[in-house]
Amino acid sequence: MTEFEVIAQYFKRNNKRTDVDLAVGDDCAVTMLKPNQRLAITTDTLVSGTHFLPSISAADLAYKTLAVNLSDLASMGATPAWVSLALTLPKVDHQWLAEFSQSLFAVLDRYHVDLIGGDTTSGPLSLTLTAQGILPKDQGLFRHQAQVGDWIFVSGSLGNSAAGLSLLLNNCKILDESDRYLLQRHLRPTPRIELGLTLRAFSRCAIDISDGLLADLGHILTRSQVGAEIELDNLPLSSHLIAKFSESEAINFALTGGEDYELCFTVADNKRSEMEQILRSQGIKVTCIGRVTPASNGLILLKQGEPVPVPTQVGFDHFSE
Ligand SMILES: [Mg+2]
């Protein structure tokens, strides 16, 4: 089977969006933007053994590849629009491709996104996805826009994904509802698209938590040249995480475990209560975990009001030993 046959059989389908002029089938895709719209563009590569366990199912892999990219669009407050996919496959496995593309299109439909191009080659399993989203000209959530006095919020609950991964890596039997929940949060994180869109009206600064809260919050602090005080007792921990791990393990997963794909964002004091009211009405859970402080204060973690040491192993770096 040639590359073109693989694309035609598994990845070519009528586009659903009206802003796609040309998609799969020419040298480039051609899409349309309205005046006063900007493009937000993100790319992520996932390599077998580095970003996912080789045992992952085709459906979970397609989901995750999309979710991590959509999460980046969410963190900018962008509306997802188009993706292109470069897929490197060891061999043409029809059942794998069928499951993969079915799962891929299910997620694309859920977020009203079109696949507009890509590439397939043979080699060790690896995926590179580029996602493009639309931002209004005067809105957006950027890492450099946190301000001293802003409240710091996170969505959902933290640490579940790292806890789920630890169950997998330790070959734990998945026995009860809590195991299944943690594993599911690892395999199927939710890109917080709706939250990102709502935050456009209230926030100027967000990041998605891919490498752990401390590492990703650290990016905001560096880019905004501010410090932060985080109250560890306010970290949102799921009942399933608490059921399975000690308090210190759970907090450690929440601070340094990656791949939760929740949003961490800041909001000015005068916008906080209206934002909380709107998000409550939308059924979106967010938790205030601290406040932005002057850069000279650095990052301070508090437990019952008392400073505690900041864990040294912060976040995941692909080039560290
Ligand atoms: Mg990100």
Image: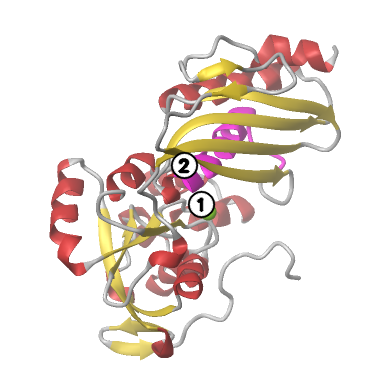
Residue hosting label 2: 184
- Disc nearer the start of the sequence (2/1): 1
Residue hosting label 1: 164
Q: Is residue 174 left or right of residue 137?
A: right
Q: Is residue 179 left or right of residue 289?
A: right
> Could you say whether the residue bearing mark 2 is in a helix, strand or loop?
helix
Up/down of 62 relative to 307, above or below: above
Residue 6 is situated, as x and y percent measured from the top left of the image, at 76, 15
Q: Which residues are magenta?
A: 54-73
Up/down of 288 relative to 89, above or below: below
Residue 183 visible within the image: no
Residue 77 visible within the image: yes
Q: Which residue sits at x=71%, y=10%? A: 8
Q: Is residue 239 left or right of residue 1?
A: left
Residue 281 is situated, as x and y percent measured from the top left of the image, at 15, 42
Q: Which residue sits at x=56%, y=16%? A: 21
Q: Could you tell me if the residues under marks 2 and 1 are in contact, i.e. CB atoms within 8 Å? A: yes
Q: Is mark 2 within 8 Å of ligand 1?
A: no
